[in-house]
Amino acid sequence: MLAGMNESSSLDPEDRKIITLARSTRARNAVPEGAAVRDETGRTYVAGTVALDSLRLTALQTAVAMAVASGATSLEAAAVVTEAAAPADADLAAVRDLGGPGTPVLLAAPDGEVRSTTRA
């Protein structure tokens, strides 16, 4: 895991964008997590937690699935807004499956403050 070094102030504008989109989705849908991923062409996919009786997906798993279903072949970055202290192993695995082991996963608090960056 890479240190949190007040990453929000030095964040790339495209990374800030996916955090903002993830945060907005979380708030709008009143779900525990919001996530966004950016594919190899710069397109973004945004999702919230899915909690159905028959299907449970984290927000990041859902965003990765949306990217795959839309034809993405790789990921440049991912972001998840959550109260959790770290990304779930299943989330990192989903990002790694599509983006590769070096794909950055930004973890932000509900207020949008980036707490850490992990490589998938």
Image (spheres, rainbow, N blue to C red):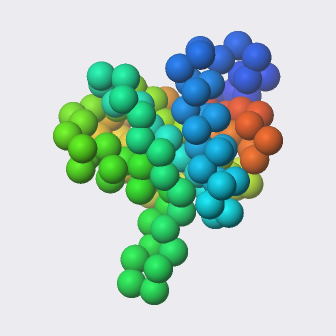
Tell me what residue is drawn at x 59 percent, y 16 percent.
13
Towards the viewer: 75 or 103: 75
Q: Quadrant of residue 106?
A: top right
Tell me what residue is drawn at x 47 percent, y 45 percent.
46
State the image coordinates of residue 47 (x, y, percent, origin top left). Answer: 49, 52
Q: Quadrant of residue 102?
A: top left
| The N terminus: image quadrant | top right
Taking the view exactly as shown, the residue that stands out farthest to the front is: 28
Tell me what residue is drawn at x 41 percent, y 56 percent.
62
Towards the viewer: 46 or 101: 46
State the image coordinates of residue 59 (x, y, percent, origin top left). Answer: 51, 56
Q: Is residue 48 left or right of residue 93?
A: right
| The C terminus: image quadrant | top left
Q: In this rendering, is residue 16 above or below 59?
A: above
State the image coordinates of residue 93 (x, y, percent, origin top left). Answer: 39, 50
Residue 103 seen in the figure: no
Q: In this rendering, is residue 52 above or below 25?
A: below
Q: Is residue 71 left or right of residue 47?
A: left
Q: In this rendering, is residue 39 above or below 66?
A: above
